[in-house]
Structure formats: C-alpha cells, structure tokens
Image (cartoon, rainbow, N blue to C red):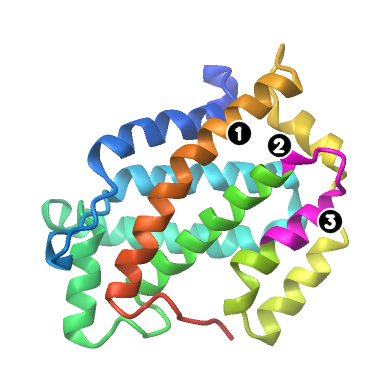
C-alpha cells in the first residue's frame, strides 16, 4: 500500500501538526468536574497512527514499541466503532471502566489509552531532543526520552526488550533525513518539530490530568 506521506508529499511531522490543529479545537478539556472532561477519540488515534509511521522510520529495532502501539490503537478503534456517539469522547470509556471495576485489567481500554499517551510523551521528548541537539547520538536521545517517559512504568521484561533495541538504532543524521521530505532542510524540520511539540505538551498535560482523576495514571507493565 502506498504510504500517505508519498501521496501528499508531507512529512509525518507536518501531518501530525495538521491533525493536532483540528484536535485543539475539540480538546483538551479538563473540567473542574471530571464528568465534563473531554478527550476527542479520532484526532487522538490519528495522531497515534502517525507515530507508527515515525517508528517505521526508525526501523525494525522499534518493533516491540510499534506492536504495542498498533494493538492499543486497534483496541480503542474497536471500542469507538462499537458506539461512535458515546465513545467519540474517550473519557466516557474511562468512566465506564472505572464504574465496572475493569480499568486495571490487562486488556482494558483504559490501559490502552495510558500506554498510547506515554508513547506520545516519548515521541514529543525525542523530537524535542533532536531539535535541540541534532549532534547527539540517536541512542542517547532515545535512551533519554525512554528513561523520562516510559521506563518508570516498565517491568523487567519490557525494559530489557528496549535496552536491546537501543543498540540497533540508526544514527541521528539518518533519522533526520528520513523525517524530511524532498526539498526540506534541517531548519524547516526544526521549525515543524517545535510547532508540533507546542501542540503536544498542553494536550498531554491535560490527558495525564484526566487519567490521574480516574486513578489509572500509574499503571505498569510486566
């Protein structure tokens, strides 16, 4: 299947910015009463799908993370498609699973949302590191991003898998070239990264606040 990037001749960064420019009109919305909070499902899932494309650029070394992201996206997509009117707001899912007592189950949608949010955290920090210090090695940038965002919530099995993947990453120059489209230079890529991160950070802060209000923000993996 021909990639969306090739068809539209836009980088994954630019596509993510466009998705988020729509999302910010719908969210984030953290209300004093958590019942009024809102996480727009489809813009968030579209953003996560673009992260899959970024992981593809890094290569097969990120297969573990990619598989987790894809499975979590699919789980939430199935939920949204089962009742589009209700689950267009993912807070309704958090509310239902909290009431049912299923939020902490291994295959819960709440858990899927938590891990997708952490993956977006990692992506935001990684891209910011790339923009700030492109001379830093890819291994250092990914290790730093992982340590801040996902490592605290990973058990021994997951952490070991990521340590192995770190040894097989491409160099940072190769990664930057993969992110850029024809005719783009690092300065324009850096501007796009800064724009994307400026959208992501407040969105992520609000999603984390909502997750915390439902008591699922500290879920861990094996």
Q: Earlier in the sequence, mark 2 or mark 3?
A: 2
Mark 1 → mark 3, Cα distance in angstroms: 19 Å
Judged left or right of residue 30, residue 141 is right
* SS under mark 3: helix
Q: Where are the magenta residues, as a range?
A: 130-145
Q: Position of residue 100 (x, y in %)?
A: 18, 85
Q: Position of residue 123 (x, y in %)?
A: 60, 50
Q: Earlier in the sequence, mark 1 or mark 2?
A: 2
Q: Which residue is mark 1?
A: 193
What residue is rendered at 29% in x and 48% in y? 28
Mark 1 → mark 2, Cα distance in angstroms: 7 Å
Judged left or right of residue 132, residue 115 is left
> Disc number at residue 139?
3
Q: Quick check: marks 1 and 2 in contact, CB under 8 Å? A: yes
Q: Which residue is mark 2?
A: 131
Residue 106, image quadrant: bottom left
Front in this rendered view, residue 96 or 27:
27
């Amino acid at each position: 299947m021909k990639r969306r990037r090739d068809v539209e001749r836009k980088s994954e960064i630019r596509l993510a910015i466009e998705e988020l420019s729509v999302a910010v009109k719908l969210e984030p919305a953290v209300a004093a009463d958590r019942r009024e909070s809102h996480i727009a499902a489809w813009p968030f899932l579209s953003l996560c799908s673009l992260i899959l494309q970024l992981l593809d650029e890094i290569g097969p070394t990120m297969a573990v993370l990619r598989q987790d992201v894809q499975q979590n996206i699919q789980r939430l997509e199935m939920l949204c498609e089962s009742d589009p009117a209700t689950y267009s707001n993912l807070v309704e899912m958090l509310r239902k699973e909290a009431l049912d007592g299923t939020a902490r189950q291994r295959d819960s949608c709440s858990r899927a949302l938590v891990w997708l949010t952490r993956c977006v955290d990692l992506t935001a920090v990684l891209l910011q590191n790339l923009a700030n210090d492109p001379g830093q090695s890819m291994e250092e940038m990914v290790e730093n991003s992982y340590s801040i965002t996902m490592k605290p919530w990973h058990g021994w099995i997951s952490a070991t898998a990521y340590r192995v993947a770190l040894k097989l990453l491409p160099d940072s120059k190769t990664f930057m070239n993969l992110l850029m489209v024809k005719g783009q230079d690092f300065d324009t890529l850096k501007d796009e990264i800064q724009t994307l991160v400026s959208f992501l950070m407040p969105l992520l802060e609000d999603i984390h606040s909502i997750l915390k209000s439902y008591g699922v923000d500290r879920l861990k993996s094996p």
